[in-house]
Image (cartoon, rainbow, N blue to C red):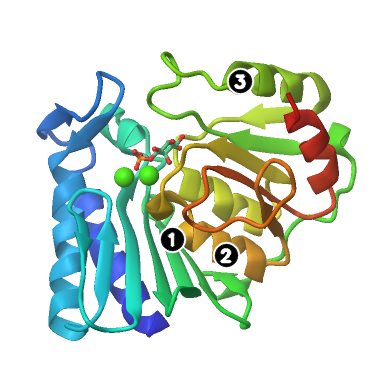
Amino acid sequence: MLDKVIYIAREAGEVLRNGFGKNFLVEYKTNVANLVTEYDKRSEKTIIDFIKKEFPTHSVLAEESGSHQSSGEYLWVIDPLDGTTNFAHGLPIFSVSIGVLKKGEMVCGVIYDVMRDAMYTAEKGSGAFCNGRKLCVSTNDDLHKSVLVTGFPYNVHENPDFAYERFTAFLRVARAVRRLGSAAIDMCYVAEGVFDGFWEVSLNAWDMAAGIILVEEAGGKITDFAGNATTIFGKQILASNGKVHQSMINVLRV
Ligand code: IPD
Ligand code: CA
Ligand code: CA
């Protein structure tokens, strides 16, 4: 199963790599900040055509085409291009993210950081890897020495939901705060121990599914902002190395 997910993530990544930097169609989704390119759709079609052929009984939840229900117990949760704004503006930070659930439980996740050719993979109970190298979260337990990462929803202007307050609160206490523009890659870097923590609101299941299992399998912790268990359908995500988790919860309290 994992090998098949890796195979198709790489194929979709190839579609994106071929389109990167070219002239392509860009449309608005909900507002001027929320873009979709023809490559989001091409990448998604590549993945869904593969699933239909190889696993006709599996269901799919994909960002651009929504829910494709089938009879089986597997569900593929797909972000065909995480980091569309970066892609559309020529910034080489974007990924393909695919998580697979069986009877509602995450079984594996794959995030392909296309331009770094970095394949992040995790299977339940078997650890997390990047290009075959085992990943482990950082050991830092001091928020003041932490490098953190976050992102903002496309409607942050109309519905800030304390995003600015939380961002500036972390700027005051952390060593540094980054905003890369691909939530999936943010979580890869938490799993890899590059970032100590990541938080964001209003993400969708396809942004988080693969990242959640990746961080957990690398020894990290995933909760909502209050420290409660969350799922891929949750509206808040806090992903950390576990050691700075409580300190981050204290800052997130508004
Ligand atoms: C977005 C990215 C970004 C995050 C946004 C997401 P998209 O996904 O993950 O980092 O801050 O909230 O919507 O639209 O590029 O697939
Ligand atoms: Ca996304
Ligand atoms: Ca996307």
Q: Amino acid at mark 1?
A: Ile
Give the Cα distance between marks 3 and 1: 29 Å
| Disc on the earlier residue, 1 or 2 | 1
Mark 1 near ligand 2 (CB under 8 Å)? no
Task: Judge depth for marks 2 and 3 and give the one in front.
Answer: 3
Q: Position of residue 177 (x, y in %)?
A: 67, 29
Residue under the point 45% across and 20% down: 156
Q: Amino acid at mark 3?
A: Phe
Kindly identify which numbered label has been placed on residue 59. Answer: none
Q: Secondary structure at mark 3?
A: loop
Q: Position of residue 121 (x, y in %)?
A: 50, 70
Q: Is residue 41 above or below residue 149?
A: below
Where is the C terminus found, in terms of image quarters? top right
Q: Can residue 192 be seen here?
A: no
Kindly identify which numbered label has been placed on residue 111. Answer: 1
Residue under the point 79% across and 19% down: 172
Residue under the point 72% across and 28% down: 176
Ligand 2 falls in which quarter? Answer: top left
Assess disc 1: are there few (<14), some (14-19) or many (≥20) residues with their C-alpha within 10 Å of its C-alpha.
many
Give the Cα distance between marks 1 and 2: 9 Å
Q: Is residue 111 left or right of residue 62?
A: right
Kindly identify which numbered label has been placed on residue 214. Answer: 2
Q: Position of residue 209 (x, y in %)?
A: 46, 60
**Which residue lies under the disc numbered 3?**
162
| Disc on the earlier residue, 3 or 1 | 1
Q: Is residue 221 left or right of residue 123?
A: right
C-beta proximity under 8 Å, tags 1 and 2: yes
Q: Is residue 158 left or right of residue 131?
A: left
Give the Cα distance between marks 2 and 3: 27 Å
Q: Can residue 224 be seen here?
A: yes
